[in-house]
Every structure is written in structure tokens, then in C-alpha cells.
Amino acid sequence: MTQLKGNNIPVTHEAEDDSANIVLINTCGFIDSAKQESIDTIMRYVEAKKDGVVDKVYVSGCLSERYKADLVAEIPEVDAFFGTREVPNILKALKADYKHELLGERLITTDSHYAYLKIAEGCDRPCSFCAIPLMRGKHVSVPIEQLVSQAENLASQGVKELLLIAQDSTYYGLDLYGKRNLAELLEKIANVEGIEWVRLHYAFPTGFPEDILEVMAEHPNICAYLDIPLQHGSTNMLKLMRRGTTREKTEALIEKIRAKVPNIAIRTTLIVGHPGETEEDFDEMVDFVQRMKFERLGVFPYSHEDNTHSGTMDDNVPEEVKEDRAMELMSIQEDISRAHNQKKIGTVQKVLFDRIESGYFVGRTEFDSPEVDNEVLVPVTEDTYVRIGDFAEVKITDASEFDLYGELLN
Ligand code: SF4
């Protein structure tokens, strides 16, 4: 988007009004529902093209990378399909030049006070259920200097919170520097002036670089937050899923993380109903969730993905059992989450405010990532005011299972 702007081509992210004459749809090809959403969006603009509302429809991203031949045959009305690493070709189609001097510059599409910083692309892990390496290729780390310069650039645009993402953030550096050096990267990003929160997502548990825990504990602006997708709590299943770890090792790692970074909020995701998951495996998962008491949890029913190892196995857990297992885990998590939240009543939290909605200023603590985690709600009254994108101190007065309620202190 920055490249287009640099070529004097006006560009709007998620323009809802169909006023653009060229539409570029960046697709997701991860799971069925995401694929469907991508197809629906493509069809919506194919119709708009037929009606003469838009002139050209281009499609890029993971769905396009994964199913290009099928898509070309099925939806010929699309002017061109591009894969995941074809920015130069997209620019060519849009009659724009690639401008090297814009490398590292970003047009922010999130609310302007936070931004995602992609530290690597692709993945070298062999997880049996996952199609991401097929779409995103091998792991490629972005050099530290480039990321620091992006972070500085974002800070100068008013970004206060940076969310570090990658398919596998704990692998960061291995390809480029011959060692895992997420710790060095975190430290350098934390030292960028103006960045008040740095948040780490998608830390794969196997080969976890424990030196990051010291860096997290030492830097108050690195959020006491870790998103570490664990996928299962039974060693049998972890083996079937090719995760390279066991339940015992995972529990030991979680204990170490909690010991080194006090008060840390751990977010994880789990898959239920992977081929071969027995009642005993699920019971182990229940016990795992009850013991680990994660602060944040997402549970997903398994679905077969084309060309993956799990995709060749018998999808032998019935759909309704998958759904029931997911619901059972989420209902256990509700109690865990409520108990965590209730401990916050009476405390004062630093909150970053994201929006105003339904009579509340809605914000987050350092323990919550946007879109996926808990929120803090402060009623809008005549004498309360906080600017969106600002931090404020909030006294927590009440808590539900997934939200906190409070009043402004300043
Ligand atoms: S680490 Fe994540 S992205 Fe990589 S293969 Fe495993 S699940 Fe997929």
C-alpha cells in the first residue's frame, strides 16, 4: 500500500463503498471458513465488475498461492491471481514502480495506536495438520536493522503498541544469523523511543529461546504477555501432530515462563478432534487445561487440510464430538478466566483505549491483545473522557469471565 501511495495511486484499505475502480483482494487460505470468506469476497467484486461498478479485480495472498490453477479455471472474471511473494508483479499490473527507498515504510491499517510488525515469513516446522508452510514457504527472518527502522517509523506515526508476529516467532534468526536471536530483537524494539508496549505472538514451544524471558522481565515496556500455541495436552496427540514436544516438557516450560516473568498472561490455542484423538487423549487435555490455568485460550475443532500429513489420516472424530469437546474446554476456561479476572478487582491497571462502543470506552491492559483477548470497559459519562489511542489508569471495579469493568483515575 505504501508502494502504491509512493506512485501517487490513491489506496483505501477495506473500502466498503465500492467506489474504487481497481480492487485487490488479499486472501486467506488457512481453514475452510477463511477460504469461504475469501471466495465470497472475490465473488462480490466479480459481480461488481460485471455490473460495471469496478474495472479490475485482482486477487493475491494465500488462497491464490495454494489454489491458483483451480481459481484461474473457476473464476476467469478475475484479471490476475498473485501468490504470497509477488508484490513486484502486483505493482507491475497496477502500473506502479517498486521504490526501494520506501522499504520499511508502512501504511497502517489498524487503529493508528497499534501495529503488527511481521518479523519473519514462512515456517520450517513439520506440524502434521498445518498447510501454512505450503502457502508461505520456508522461514525467512527479516533483519533486525530493518525491523528496528520499521518500528521507529511506526513510532513516528504515533504507534504506541507493536505486536510482533510471524508464523513461528521463536525460530527468529536461525536462518539469518545461525542462532535464535529473538531476545536481541525484542530488546532493540523495546528501546525504540515512543513504543510503550511490545507484545509477542506465536511463540512455538519447541526450541523456545528461554533468554527472551529475562529480556521480558527486565523491560517494563515488553508486555507480560505471551502467545504460545500449544495445540494439545496429551503426549500421544503431540506426537501424532508432530510438534516435537511432550506434555511434561510443555508443563515444565509453562512453569519456567511463569517463574521468570511474574504475572504473565499466557495465551494459547488448542485443537480438538485431530485424527486419532481418543476419549483418554481428550481427558488428558481437560486435565492439562485445568492444571495450566491459562489466562487466555482459543479452542478450534480440527478440519482436514489438503496436502497435509493429517489430511491423509482418517478424520475419525465425528463433527459433533469435536464441537462438544471444544465447548467443554471453553466452559472450563470460562471459570478459569473468571477467577483470573476477579483477582484484578480493586487493582489499578494501565489501559490503552481502542474505541468507544455501546456507551463504554473500550480498552486493554498489557495482558490483552487486540481482537482476541479481554477488554476493559469504562462507562462514558458526562465527566469521563479519554482520548482513543491514549493510555489511562483505571481502577477495576468489577469483572466477568472475559471482561473487566472500571473507572478512570486520571
Ligand atoms: S509452527 Fe505453526 S505455521 Fe508452522 S507448521 Fe506448525 S502450526 Fe503451521
Image: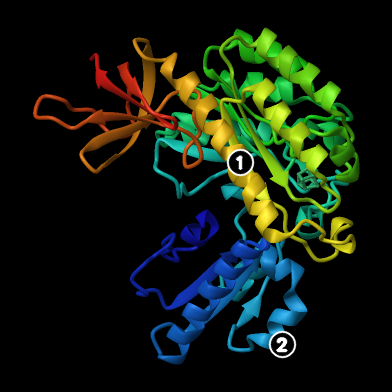
In the figure, residue 51 lies in which quadrant? bottom left
Residue 67 or 11: which is nearer the viewer?
67
Residue 352 in which image quadrant: top left
Q: Amino acid at mark 1?
A: Glu
Q: Image check: 285 left or right of 107?
A: right
Residue under label 2: 73
Among the two numbered marks 2 and 1 on one chain, the one whose residue lies closer to the N terminus: 2
Task: Determine whether 53 is above or below 376 in the image.
Answer: below
Element under disc 2: helix
In the depicted structure, whether residue 346 falls above or below residue 385: above
Q: Where does the image place residue 287, in percent across and percent down from the top left?
A: 72, 27
Disc 1 secondary structure class: helix
Q: Position of residue 400 (x, y in %)?
A: 39, 28
Residue 146 visible: yes
Horizontal relation, residue 118 to residue 400: left or right:
right
Residue 204 seen in render:
no
Q: Is mark 2 within 8 Å of ligand 1?
A: no
- Name the residue type under label 2: Ala
Q: Residue at x 66, y 58 (%)?
A: 320
In the rendering, at what x and y percent does residue 209 appear? Answer: 79, 22
Whether the residue carrying mark 1 lies under 8 Å from ligand 1 is answered with no
| Quadrant location, ligand no. 1 | top right
Residue tagged 1: 328
Q: Residue at x 77, y 61 (%)?
A: 304
Disc 2 residue crowd, few under 14, some 14–19, many 20+, Cα 10 Å: few
- Image position of 62 (left or right of 54): right
* Residue 203 placement: quadrant: top right
Q: Is residue 256 above or below residue 152?
A: above
